[in-house]
Image (spheres, rainbow, N blue to C red):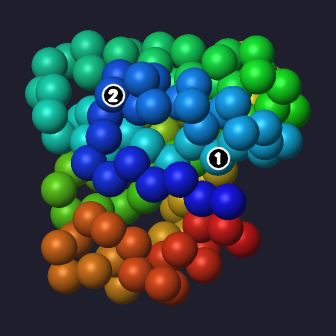
């Protein structure tokens, strides 16, 4: 089962997480972060995103989710590669420290996103889930 919350930031998704988790899942994939980095340009925005991802993962665990996977930010033309790499490094470090699974999306390229330069085409979605 997929639950999509398009346009959400990690903070906003925290509000939607409880009703979704109450349905009972073994695995949660958190694929979020671009909107945080686009809406908040402060230097602390990556740290805030990582903090919120950790809160979401902890909430998942508290509802019995045994597998928490956190998806790295895929390439897009809305954020600089430097910002994407910084965010992904911090997310990966947090995942290693907290024993969550980090999904490296470096295999997704510009040819896997729609003309908007942000949202994944079917080919990008296939790469994400494999």
Could you tell me residue 42's position as x and y percent? 14, 19
Which image quadrant: the C terminus?
Answer: bottom right
Q: Is residue 36 left or right of residue 17?
A: left
Q: Which residue is mark 2?
A: 12
* Residue at (57, 31) in percent of width and height: 19
Secondary element under disc 1, as helix, strand or loop, is strand
Could you tell me residue 7's position as x and y percent? 26, 48
Q: Is residue 41 left or right of residue 14?
A: left
Eye-nearest disc, 2 or 1: 2
> Could you say which quadrant of the image residue 8 lies in?
top left
Q: Which residue is mark 1?
A: 29
Could you tell me residue 82's position as x and y percent? 29, 43
In this rendering, does residue 49 appear at all? no
Q: Nearer the viewer, residue 125 or 44?
A: 125
* Residue at (51, 85) in percent of width and height: 123
Q: Nearer the viewer, residue 120 or 56?
A: 56
Residue 16 disc label: none
Secondary element under disc 2, as helix, strand or loop, is helix
């Amino acid at each position: 089962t997929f639950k999509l919350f398009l346009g959400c930031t990690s903070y906003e998704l925290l509000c939607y997480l409880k009703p979704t988790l109450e349905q009972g899942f073994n695995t949660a994939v958190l694929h979020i972060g671009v909107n945080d980095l686009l809406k908040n340009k402060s230097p602390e925005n990556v740290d805030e995103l990582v903090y919120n991802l950790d809160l979401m993962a902890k909430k998942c665990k508290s509802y019995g989710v045994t597998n928490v996977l956190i998806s790295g930010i895929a390439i897009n033309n809305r954020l600089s590669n430097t910002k994407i790499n910084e965010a992904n490094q911090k997310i990966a470090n947090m995942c290693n420290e907290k024993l969550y699974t980090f999904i490296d999306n470096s295999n997704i390229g510009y040819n896997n996103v729609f003309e908007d330069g942000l949202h994944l085409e079917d080919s990008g979605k296939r790469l994400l889930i494999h």
